[in-house]
Image (spheres, helix red, strand yellow):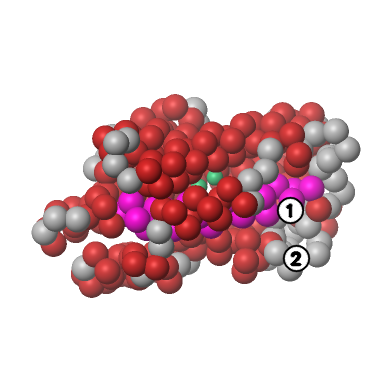
Amino acid sequence: MLNTYSYEAALAASESVHWRVEDIIGGEKRLDFTRHFMPESLAQTESLSFLTNEERRILNQIRGNAYLCIFGLVEEFILPFVLDHARPQLQGDDYRVRALLQFAGEEAKHIQLFKRFKQEFEDGFGTECQVIGPPEAIAAAILSHEPLGIALTTLHIEWMVQRHYIDSIKDDQDLDPQFKSLLKHHWIEEVQHAKLDTLMVGALAAGRGEEEILHGVEEYLAIGGFLDNGLKQQVEFDLESFELASGRTLSVPQREEFQRVQLRANRWTYLGTGMTHERVLETLEWLTPKARQIVESVSPAFC
Ligand SMILES: [Fe+2]
Ligand SMILES: [Fe+2]
């Protein structure tokens, strides 16, 4: 698989699909708050039978806001990580240097896009929705881990974006067209990131013995555990945001049901869909079959 990806091809593909933030948000391009933002497979509001349709839409939009804000958060660690990875070999392969800098530039652009979205969401939604953070603290915690663990986390995130868009978003006609457009434009550039991440994992694993590789996998799982704690906090924020926006106070059993269903939904969205992605598993297996086995033994908890 590593042999099928190249810096030159990734750079060429990236340049051919390039877009500007100004082309996809602002002006006439507005969010429609009467529509859903997230596909049901990720939002999972249907099984909360005590919610009305309007309340489901409110929760769906809260989840949509958190989704783009959480991408903004994780891309704040991906950006310096990719720059650090490129920096020691600026005199090396020209295509490698340019492809990695393009990758970093696109993540900086995505962070800006998500900030623009956040502002528009706040202006249109009507009540405050808290999201975990601050981004710098989350980035610092993740970047304190070992580089192979960070590269595997990045790989997970990039393939996860592919899966969300292709499996759940692309053909969902109920979603707000503007929100869907943001997801589509993000997805289109992330395709190349997923390939470049695979090459980064290969470069970081080169020359390592199995024990060192497995240490990198442990680090990946430790970062996953850190993110999982963030998701538990996010479910609490979403519950508060829901009660504030809907003007409804849930009973104790309803709150417990909300927390249970939404924690499962968040875990599937951000952890399960990446950990079980076939391309992620193939890369793990390429590192060492034990790496794949370890991740496969842990992933059911997030699915
Ligand atoms: Fe991105
Ligand atoms: Fe990316």
- In which image quadrant can residue 84 be found? top left
Along the line of sight, the residue nearer the viewer: 105 or 51: 105
Res 166 seen here: yes
Q: What element does badge 2 sit on? A: loop
The spot of residue 96 in percent (x, y) is 38, 46
Q: Residue at x 49, y 41 (%)?
A: 102
Query: Picture coordinates of residue 235 (x, y %)?
Result: 56, 45
Identified by mark 2, the residue type is Asp
Sooner in the amino-acid sequence: mark 1 or mark 2: 2
The structure residue drawn at horizontal position 62% and vertical position 52%, both measured from the top left corner, is: 16
- The secondary structure that most of the magenta stretch takes on is helix
- Does the numbered disc 1 mark a residue whose Cβ is under 8 Å from ligand 1? no
Which residue does the image show at 64% across and 51% down from the upper left? 17
Q: x and y percent of residue 14 in the render?
A: 56, 50
Q: Which span is picked out in magenta?
A: 178-201
Find disc 2 in the rendering and name its residue: 172
Residue 189 among magenta residues: yes
Tell me: 96 left or right of 51: left
Does the residue at mark 1 contact the one at mark 2 (Cβ under 8 Å)? yes
In the depicted structure, whether residue 80 falls above or below residue 102: above
Residue at image position (82%, 58%) is 53
Residue under label 1: 180
